[in-house]
Image (tube, rainbow, N blue to C red):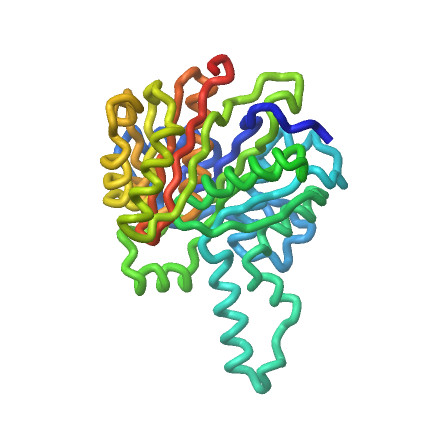
Amino acid sequence: MIKHHDTLAVWDIAVRCSAGSGTDPVFAVLTEGSVLQPQIEDFNIRKEVGPKGTRTLDRSAGLALAAMGQLGRLATIPAGRDDVGIVLATSFGSIASTIQFTQESLSGDRPYLVDPSRFPNTVMNFAASQGAIRHGLRGPNATLIAGAGSALHGLDYCWRLIELGQADALILGGVEEWTPERVQLEHDAGSRGDFVEGAAALLVGPSALWQETPLARVSMVLTGVVHDSDSATQLVRRWRTNLPTEAPEMLIRVGHSVAIDRLLDALAIPENGLDTPTRTLALDSLGDLGAWGSALALTLAAEVARSGTRARIVSADERGPVSITDLNPCSQP
């Protein structure tokens, strides 16, 4: 095991959404001021993941595996490693699988006359576990749910796992599926826009994990939960002491715009430079991305950091979770 006293870095990134694969199509949509189509029309699990072991996969797991499969560096990791794992962000897993399994038990001749092979799909960790099985990864395996910023909280979790010596590298991802069941739930919950499915994945680990230069360096991850004005005041006071004085060159906003504005207003003191980014990307302009939006934000930030741009991701959810993450070029401290 590597001694994890080094800086956390992003080694590889992947995106699968209705705009295509990779970050370039997403940047193009943002530049055009357009939106992502809610559903990936041409998505076929067998074609994107391969025919082996896909019979019981649901759409959520298929999307997650498709993104993980695009991580080219993952192919260099031998199967069976117990120091490489997966941390996945999602809102529900596959809510369609859960609803359909429940309906089958209620509408059949007997409640127990259901297809038992479909039960694992109802478990929220199904996609992450399928990723571990497919790639032979025996390290930590977890699914995190923290609203729009789930993957940023997941990044904090990855950092702690690596610092504690529980893993040498981790796949961090986020996934949401478009299904009639999910769309109905979002509509009933008063979704702010069209729900958009997709998946994004990153391979993270210490910056000395390989001899090559990583894509980006993770210089800061701040996470918290705001329940009321008192907790907000305490969080802002704590975060102000951790924010770097150098302003980011790009600010990426993820989540509820009003909640983000409140957080930025509270933190916008002159010495942190938070209010002076050169460029701002608001991912809610793409549609309602759910939990996978924060994983997408990390891939976009890693891509611009590779080009020499300091990026900061700010996420806030109306239900309380908030986070700030800085990704810097590897040439910068």
Residue 141 location (% of width, % of height): 63, 48
What is the quadrant of residue 248 in the picture? top left
Q: Is residue 233 left or right of residue 302?
A: left
13, above or below 47, in the image: above
Residue 50 location (% of width, % of height): 64, 45
Residue 92 location (% of width, % of height): 47, 57
Query: Measuring 52% from the left and 34% from the top, which residue is drawn there?
Result: 14
Q: Is residue 165 left or right of residue 38?
A: right
Q: Is residue 151 left or right of residue 269?
A: right
Q: Is residue 74 left or right of residue 243?
A: right
| Residue furthest bottom as drawn | 109
160, above or below 108, in the image: above
Residue 15 location (% of width, % of height): 48, 36
What is the quadrant of residue 242 in the picture? top left
Query: Measuring 45% from the left and 26% from the top, which residue is drawn there?
Result: 327
Query: Measuring 29% from the left and 28% from the top, which residue is drawn there?
Result: 280
Query: Measuring 57% from the left and 61% from the top, which residue is drawn there?
Result: 123
Residue 67 can be seen in this image: no
Residue 26 can be seen in this image: yes
